[in-house]
Image (cartoon, rainbow, N blue to C red):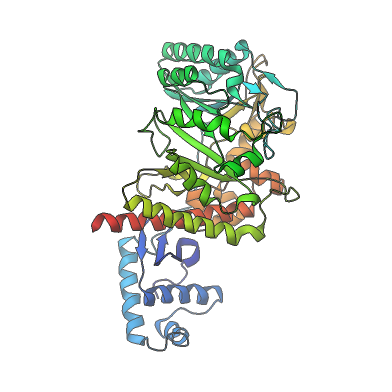
Amino acid sequence: MFLEGYAIEKNVHTYRQGDLKIAYDVNSGSLHVLDNATFSIIKTLEKMQREGRKLSPRNIWSELKEHSPKITQEEVEEILREMEELAQEGILFSKVVEEKAPIYPSQPIVKAMCLHVAHDCNLRCSYCFAGTGAFGGERGLMDLTTGKKAIDFLLEASAHRKHCEIDFFGGEPLMNFSVVKELVEYGKKAAQEKGKTIKFTLTTNGVLLTEDIQQYLEEEDISVVLSIDGRPKVHDRMRPNLGGKGSYDQVLPRLQQFVEKRPDSSPYAVGTYYYARGTYTSYNLDFDKDVTHLLDLGIKRVSLEPVIAPPDQPYALVEEDLPEIFQAYDRLGEELLARRQKGEEFSFFHFNVALDQGPCLPKRLSGCGAGHEYVAISPEGDLYPCHQFVGQEEFKMGSLNDEQIKLNPRMVEEFRSAHVYNKDKCRDCWARFSCSGGCHSANHAFTNSLDEVYDLSCAFQKKRLEVALYLKIKEEMIKSL
């Protein structure tokens, strides 16, 4: 039989979502809507393969007729022939992509930087991975000299690349706004002298997002990530100010004022954009209501992330929460579909998929590039693999104050090697080309290894992808009407 020796569950993911039965061909990116008989046959093939049984039309029919007595052996054989034709066309049970590790230049080429201009914050968020802004150290602000050194390092370490990226981060970067402004001016001039450009982004909680600062961000084409968790009680519970009072009423008007300036912001976070980024916890497992709350307020670019926290924290997400979380993603998918049918324009970041024009395969295998293509720099000038590792001494990769600024080669290799094909759980996973092996920081925090995966995060990723693929099909169906 044509599927003998073909790892079905690894390479074709079949599932139910909404009113559809779907097959996602992992290697080609093709999507198929299945009828009941075809869905049952593929599920039977999966079961028989797991049990090590021989795949043949007769064996498949014998297994099927116990649950579907009306199906005939002739029908089974006809469906198998149709599936074989699709396999020959390369769109179902397609040829498995050869396992090849990403190839990198001997010297890392850094293209993006998270610049920690403030290790202090004017909020005291309960779940903050940065220890409310101090990253486990002393509170402080980056000085202009260190910021300029960081920009010089990026322009040099980016080698032949013409386009670089800098994200002003904290803490709260607007607490050091005067330095941010000077660094933008310096960066644009220094990049121009080298025939390059720098795309600037700023992540803010909105407390200091005055009209003057909003205007500056517009004039300088700086993309902005706005922190808000959703409904007032949800936001205020986790994001109080220094006095313990909720910050929702303080930040919402400023966020709304700013997003009105960018009605054409890209849903894929390209160009000059804004995104509202929130976090959901065990306190709001109905987080779909927080997404729709923001949409109703006119905030149309939304990303809501699951909190990453030790299981002993009361707000942490645990395995027992998964059924409710999955239901929330299901409800959110249907709600967004209904809104789209009414002509509403919006974007939920984790439901964006580009099956035909996504990242190249090496990027799909390795993800964000932390530790070799992307680095973070602390206010003191220390280099780390990404913003999530800042303050962890064992992950310090170098310093801007070194005579020769160079990323620790051992750590560069460790992060380069932490790709899908070096993670046992990822190699056989149907979502391997979509999640890139997950977040390095979360994986290490929960497994103490870059090559092991945080199981809960895997579950989130796969569920979001299932809903996203379903929405992709539904939207194409609507277009064809």
Q: Is residue 196 above or below residue 389?
A: above
Where residue 408 sits, quadrant-wise, is: top right
Q: Position of residue 147 (x, y in %)?
A: 59, 15
Q: Position of residue 173 (x, y in %)?
A: 59, 23
Q: Is residue 41 above or below residue 411?
A: below
As drawn, which residue projects farthest toward the left? 481
Image quarter (top left, top right, bottom left or bottom right) of the N terminus: bottom left
Q: Is residue 338 above or below residue 398?
A: below
Nearer to the camera, 214 or 53: 214
| 59 with respect to 473 (left or right) | right
Nearer to the camera, 417 or 181: 181
Asked whether residue 125 appears in the rendered view, the answer is yes
Q: Residue at x 49, y 79 (%)?
A: 54
| 396 with respect to 26 (left or right) | right
Asked whether residue 418 appears in the rendered view, the answer is no
Numbered disc total: 0
Nearer to the camera, 344 or 218: 344
